[in-house]
Image (cartoon, grey):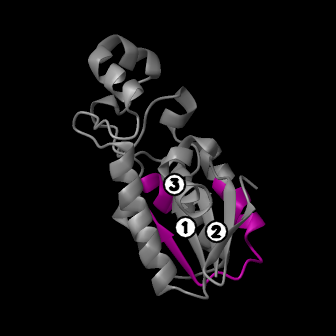
Amino acid sequence: MKLIFVRHGETIHNHKGLYCGWNDLDLTEKGMMQAKKVCEKLKEENLNLIITSDLNRTIKTAEIINVDHHINIILEKNLREMNFGLWEGLSYKEIKEKYVKELNGWESDWIDYILPSGESVRQMYERVTAVMDKIIHQYKNENILIVSHAGCIRAILAYLIGNGIDDYWKYKVENCGITTIEMVDDFPVLNGLNQ
């Protein structure tokens, strides 16, 4: 089994350095071009299925990549980015000014602090890893493209390759970076990061 992960292309919030979790944004022109480059890179890849987060930026990225494959795309809400709640659409500077207490809570316990109207890293991690277990079990021996978000892909890498949630920040995931994990007798092997 081969799992190919692609983070969606650039959005305006990515460009401006704003927090973007469940805000449903479209790709920028640059984001569309990034997705087209991934389409070209994966043209010869033997894919059986595409599973994507149900947000516009991932769906559009998946559709662009699928131009040469013409395979089913399944939407999976549990592959959404972390819900940043009140921080959605804000810069770190704005959060520092408007949400001092919440930022202190986050910085003192980044794993379990639940953002107001949002979720904690642990809640996102458990949501994403549970759906990954289902995907691995259901589509054994198939090649699956998963189009998701930076936080989700980091969570999956920490879960499958690292030592769990504590390794969450050890992986940098670029817009439209291609990350590949091969399952060798149920043993996950990282075969490429941000290719």
Q: Which residue is mark 2?
A: 4
Is residue 28 highlighted in magenta?
no
Q: Nearer the viewer, residue 70 or 82?
A: 82
Residue 179, image quadrant: bottom right
Q: Earlier in the sequence, mark 3 or mark 2?
A: 2
Q: Which residue is mark 3?
A: 164
Cα–Cα gap, marks 1 and 3: 20 Å
Cα–Cα gap, marks 2 and 1: 6 Å
Q: Position of residue 72 (x, y in %)?
A: 50, 81
Q: Position of residue 105 (x, y in %)?
A: 32, 25
Image quarter (top left, top right, bottom left or bottom right) of the C terminus: bottom right
Residue 187, image quadrant: bottom right
Q: Is residue 58 left or right of residue 68?
A: left
Evaluate whether residue 73 shows in this view: no
What's the residue at 53%, 36% (across, down)?
A: 14
What range is drawn magenta here?
35-60
Q: Mark 3: which amino acid?
A: Gly
In the picture as drawn, the residue positioned furthest to the front comes out as 163
Q: Which mark is residue 146?
A: 1
At mark 2, the secondary structure is strand
Q: Nearer the viewer, mark 1 or mark 3?
A: 3
